[in-house]
Amino acid sequence: MKDRLYEGFRKYYGDSNGAELFFSPGRVNLIGEHTDYNGGHVFPCALTMGTYALVRKRGDNKMNFVSLNFNNAEVTTVELPELSYQKKNGWANYLIGVVWAFLGKGYKIDKGFDLAMLGNIPSGAGLSSSASIEVLMGTALKYLYDIDIDMVEIAKIGQTSENQFNGMNCGIMDQFAVAMGKKDNAIFLDTADLSYEYAPVKLKDAKVLITNSHVKHSLVDSAYNDRRNESTAALKALQTKLNISGLGDLTEEEFEENQYLITDEVQRKRAKHAVYENQRTIKAVNALKNNDIETFGKLMNASHISLRDDYEVSCPEVDKLVEIAWNIPGVIGSRITGGGFGGCTVSIVKNDAIENFRKEVISKYKEATGIDAEIYEAEIGDGAGRIQ
């Protein structure tokens, strides 16, 4: 893959002298979905699949971007310092937005660069290709321009750029997981204050498998922002009586006692998911620490039901994948992962059931939907960085 990247860089920019190599992973969230912008807990991990970039500073103010994932790719060029969202720039807006956010924070980026990118995260799969390239850009800027910034701040800038430049009102989880990932560990993150701890993912006789539904989602154009607005409205209704800053501040019992304050039924369902999912995440991490994988799996299953029925971010194809998985012996738990409206499921499967899982899921899903599913074994890797 690196050879292809160097070859592509030379094709578009003449030579690769002085270019620096960076990597940024994708992520999968084991449990804790749509809780990150509701002040709750999440439990993601970085993957070994991700995005590589070669970047080299220029002597002028031009920034050139090319993605080698596209056949006959064309270079997108913009000029510093006046940066704005332009639809014609497509995927490059995620990178341009990070430069824009760095400049907005007062960091000095006075010269442009040439950038070539190549990744192996399936597009639209819900494994956070957008956060991967945002953190990749932030990491490259840190080293190229000798900027004194830590990885948590790079994650925050990635979120800012997606919110304010690209108009996607996401929480912090994706960028944080990509920036702060640690091999063989998931991150138990409290999104209310960004306190976190690493929890080893030791599954002895089981593996984490990701199944791609190959139903593409486009979150910016989807109901994602609606869900966030509905959750915010529910919070405001609860705040007429309760002194809380986020839905993640509530226990299940406190929610049940006070849900009458939310008069809109849809908003009440959204709030119920946020509260219960946050508590499920806390319980799931405790179960993992106690090597109680069965409880972890049951909480994953409950998470999917809540995302399907209360938060309504699943879709028939993903529900079918989960239903097939639930009926296979040796599957400990399975749920949708990521923003929703398509994408992937994450399942914990006993080692001796993996072969049967692959066969059953692929054949039954094809039979039900006509679509070929793809299954990857999740290898948990480190966060973004420079490759020396």
Image (cartoon, rainbow, N blue to C red):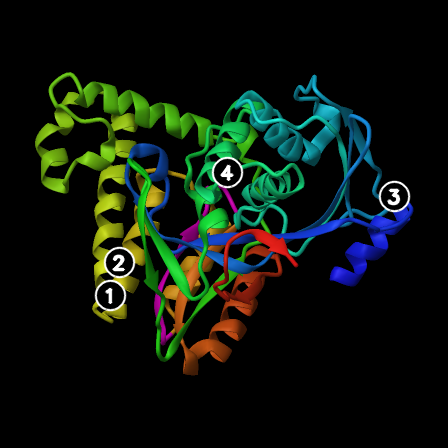
- Residue identified by numbered label 2: 285
- Residue 131 picture location, percent across and down: 54, 42
Q: Earlier in the sequence, mark 4 or mark 2?
A: 4
Residue at the location (8% across, 32% down)? 257
User: Is residue 179 on the magenta stretch?
Assistant: no
Left or right: residue 292 compared with residue 229:
left
For discs 3 and 1, the disc positioned in front in the rendered view: 3
For discs 3 and 2, the disc positioned in front in the rendered view: 3
User: Would you identify the image quadrant in which residue 66 lies?
Assistant: top right
- Residue identified by numbered label 4: 149
- Near-viewer residue (356 or 34): 34
For the residues labelled 3 and 4, the Cα–Cα distance comes to 29 Å
For the residues labelled 3 and 2, the Cα–Cα distance comes to 47 Å
Q: Categorize mark 2 by other alpha carbons within 10 Å: few (<14), some (14-19), many (20+).
A: many
Q: What stretch is highlighted in magenta?
A: 329-342
Residue at the location (26% across, 58% down)? 285
For the residues labelled 4 and 2, the Cα–Cα distance comes to 30 Å
Three-letter code for the amino acid on which mark 2 is drawn:
Val
Left or right: residue 4 compared with residue 127:
right
- Residue identified by numbered label 1: 289
For the residues labelled 3 and 1, the Cα–Cα distance comes to 50 Å
Three-letter code for the amino acid on which mark 1 is drawn:
Lys
Three-letter code for the amino acid on which mark 3 is drawn:
Tyr
Q: Categorize mark 1 by other alpha carbons within 10 Å: few (<14), some (14-19), many (20+).
A: some
Tell me whether circle 2 and circle 1 mark residues in contact (CB < 8 Å). Answer: yes
Tell me whether circle 4 and circle 2 mark residues in contact (CB < 8 Å). Answer: no
Q: Categorize mark 4 by other alpha carbons within 10 Å: few (<14), some (14-19), many (20+).
A: some
- Residue identified by numbered label 3: 13
